[in-house]
Image: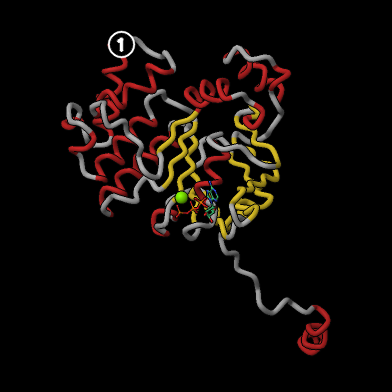
Amino acid sequence: MVYDMLWKAASKKKQSLENMVPSDSLIDLRTVVKRYETPAGPFTALHDADLQIGEAQFVAIVGKSGSGKSTLLNMITGIDRPSEGEVIIGGTPVHTLTEAQMASWRGRELGIVFQFFQLLPTLNVLQNVILPMEFANLYSPREREERALALLNRVGLGDQAAKMPSALSGGQQQRVAIARALANDPPILVADEPTGNLDTRTANTMLDLFGALTSEGKTIVMVTHDNDLAQRADRTFTVADGQVFEELPAITVATEPFDAWAAIPVLEEAAR
Ligand SMILES: Nc1ncnc2c1ncn2[C@@H]1O[C@H](COP(=O)(O)OP(=O)(O)OP(=O)(O)O)[C@@H](O)[C@H]1O
Ligand SMILES: [Mg+2]
């Protein structure tokens, strides 16, 4: 069954099956360690991180500043490479790809909303959203423009298409970055604080959009500092000092377990 899926995925992407790794999860990080070399010596930003995320899931990543959230996202997107461990996304062992393979894989499979937007300042808003489609050579020039406008409308910025990014507020730029991340209709959206610059109402509108996207089958991994927004995700992971834990819903446990032996005299009394 897993191999069946891999065959289909491999033939669709014109990749050979030998390069694919069987995995039950769309996003599969296996004991990932990330160490940075610093003047003060090696610093471990991720310790044995395991993370398995299935298709069409909306996942929130929370944790204090400096805990390792962006580092974790950089492992998923292949922007940075693990020091140890494996990163398997849709059966592709991302940590083994060359830079060129990585760029082409990323362009097709991932939409990324960066923590600091990273819009190109010399292109207007519409051109920024069109750019990923040009890079991946997807869609006709006319379709690219139509798609970009539709996406800008979806984030409430259809009327800002001709402006330069510098003429937009931080929150508007952030929404352009969300539209750009969706340009190639990727199966996975990875977003680092995509609502950090938005007011509560606009942030909730973006979360509605993410909810709609997961119902359409997309998988979303979102870093947020906002616990209320994290509540809207299907699953939440916390990163603390480079360790990744899943927050599981609280379960109610009976405080006094039923003691059958103690019940016997009571039952005997009742039977008399
Ligand atoms: N290139 C680097 N070289 C050395 N240390 C780094 C590097 N990048 C990140 N770090 C360190 O790794 C740790 C995790 O950083 P990271 O950016 O993942 O944190 P974060 O959880 O995303 O924080 P924030 O909420 O502030 O964005 C921090 O202590 C940071 O200083
Ligand atoms: Mg960060």
In the displayed structure, 31 sits above or below 182; it is: below
Q: Is residue 245 visible?
A: no
Please provide percent x and percent y for residue 220: 47, 39
Residue drawn at point x = 59 percent, y = 59 percent: 241
In the displayed structure, 128 sits above or below 227; it is: above
Quadrant including the N terminus: top right
Please provide percent x and percent y for residue 119: 32, 34
Q: Is residue 209 visible?
A: yes
**Residue that badge 1 annotates:** 141
Residue drawn at point x = 74 percent, y = 77 percent: 258
Q: What SS does tag 1 mark?
A: helix
Q: Is residue 74 left or right of residue 212?
A: right
Quadrant including the C terminus: bottom right
In the displayed structure, 190 sits above or below 260; it is: above
Q: Is residue 130 left or right of residue 101?
A: left
Q: Quadrant of residue 150?
A: top left
